[in-house]
């Protein structure tokens, strides 16, 4: 089995973008069995001509959060270097599991797959 993840990366090697800096997301497919992963595509996030700001002054207003949520809606997880509470909560409300993972992509995917497998095993034992 496999699942999709989205990453905020400017160089294709590291998860190094804050949520509000994202202009595109990289989509990967991860094999649950061995943790191997492969790049699928980049998805561009269309921003309004002027960056939308939230109450904390960053550029992650509700419209932007909605656009990112739509772009990654088919992914199990969305990994970024940093994300604020409001954006994280809004994504979670739309069933997007966002995780701060400021690591090299290889390290992040390895850790994430271990979490995914252990979480899935726990779900199987719920009575």
Image (cartoon, rainbow, N blue to C red):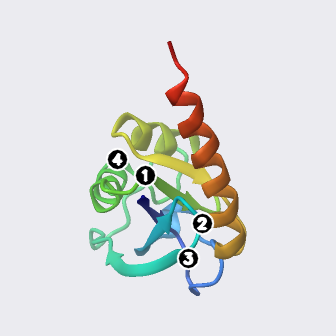
Q: Which is more N-terminal, label 4 or label 2?
A: 2
Q: Specify few, some or many for label 2: CA neighbours under 10 Å numbering under 14, 14-19, or 20 or more.
A: some
Q: In the image, is residue 10 above or below residue 35?
A: below
- Position of residue 73 in the picture relative to residue 105 (left or right): left
Give the labeled residue for mark 2: 35
Q: Residue 47 — which label? A: none
The Cα atoms of the two marked residues, 3 and 2, are separated by 19 Å
Q: Nearer the viewer, mark 4 or mark 1?
A: 1
**Residue 81 location, x and y as percent?**
64, 63
The Cα atoms of the two marked residues, 2 and 1, are separated by 14 Å
Give the labeled residue for mark 1: 76
* Tag 1 secondary structure: loop
Give the labeled residue for mark 4: 62
In this view, the residue farthest toward the top is 127
Give the labeled residue for mark 3: 9
Q: In the image, is residue 39 above or below residue 50?
A: below
Q: Nearer the viewer, residue 97 or 22?
A: 97
- Position of residue 109 in the picture relative to residue 124 (left or right): right
Q: Name the residue at 43% across, 38% down.
A: 92
């Amino acid at each position: 089995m496999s699942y999709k993840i989205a990453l905020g990366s400017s160089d294709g090697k590291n998860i190094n973008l804050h949520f509000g800096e994202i202009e595109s997301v990289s989509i990967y497919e991860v094999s649950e069995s061995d943790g191997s992963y492969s790049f699928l595509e980049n998805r561009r996030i269309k921003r309004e001509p002027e960056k939308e700001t939230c109450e904390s002054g960053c550029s992650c207003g509700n419209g932007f959060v909605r656009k990112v949520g739509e772009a990654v809606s088919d992914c199990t997880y969305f990994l970024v270097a940093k994300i604020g509470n409001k954006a994280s909560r809004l994504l979670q409300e739309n069933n997007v599991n966002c995780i701060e993972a400021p690591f090299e992509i290889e390290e992040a995917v390895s850790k994430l797959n271990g979490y995914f497998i252990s979480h899935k095993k726990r779900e199987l034992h719920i009575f």
